[in-house]
Image (cartoon, helix red, strand yellow):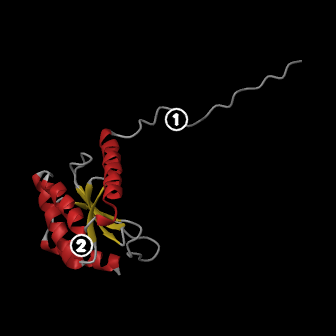
Amino acid sequence: MKDTHKRATSTTATATTFEGFTDEERGAMKQRAQELKASARRGSRASTADDEAAVLAKIAQMQESDRVMAERLHAVITASAPDLAPKLWYGMPAYAKDGKVLCFFQSAQKFNARYATFGFSDRANLDEGAMWPTSYALQELTAADQARIGALVKKAVN
């Protein structure tokens, strides 16, 4: 007598497949690798001025709506937390404390999104209870929005 074993079948849908990274995601990863290589080549002679120039150059390349927001954010962040160092992070403007990214801007154009994003890393001191926001969708920046972002950046640094 033979034992027959039935193959286990899954009850979950198999129509979804992993497509891998998008072209935009692969591009961001390549930009990050280039940033790391450039930083390693510069070594100790790297300066904050060089990093800020790279950030401003990247902002200048953005589409107008994203560029205007990024320029305003840059001004708000550098005024609110002058100790943060501008640097590129995955090809986008970011601001670091002690070499670690604390907050960043992601243009809508970068990933073909309908809005730009301003976000904070896990190093930001924004903890409020058991749940708090770490990124914000931006379609425009009002004076009130700029003031709120400035306050969040100050809180994140402390």
Could you say which quadrant of the image residue 67 lies in?
Answer: bottom left
Q: Where in the figure is residue 71, as x and y percent of width and height?
A: 14, 64
Tell which residue pokes out farthest to the right in this image: 1
3D distance between C-alphas at marks 2 and 1: 42 Å
- Residue ID for mark 2: 149
- Which amino acid type corresponds to the residue marked 2 in the rendered image? Ile
Closer to the eye: label 2 or 1: 2
Residue nearest the viewer, comparing 9 with 122: 122
Percent x, y for residue 119?
31, 64
Q: What is the x, y in percent for residue 113? A: 25, 48
Residue 71 lies, with reference to residue 33, above or below; the image says: below
Query: In the depicted view, which residue is nearer to us: 69 or 7?
Result: 69
**Residue 53 sits above or below residue 129 on the image:** above
Q: Residue at x 30, y 48 (%)?
A: 31
Quarter holding the C terminus is bottom left
The image quarter containing residue 19 is: top left
- Residue denoted by label 1: 13
Cβ atoms at labels 2 and 1 below 8 Å apart:
no
Callout 2: SS: helix
Q: Quadrant of residue 100?
A: bottom left
Left or right of 69 on screen, residue 83:
right
Mark 2 neighbour class, 10 Å CA radius: few under 14, some 14 to 19, many 20 or more: some
Q: Tell me if mark 1 has few (under 14), some (14-19) or many (20+) residues whose alpha carbon lies within 10 angstroms of its own.
A: few
Q: Residue at x 35, y 47 (%)?
A: 29
Q: Secondary structure at mark 1?
A: loop
The outermost residue toward the front is 45
Residue ID at (13%, 69%): 142
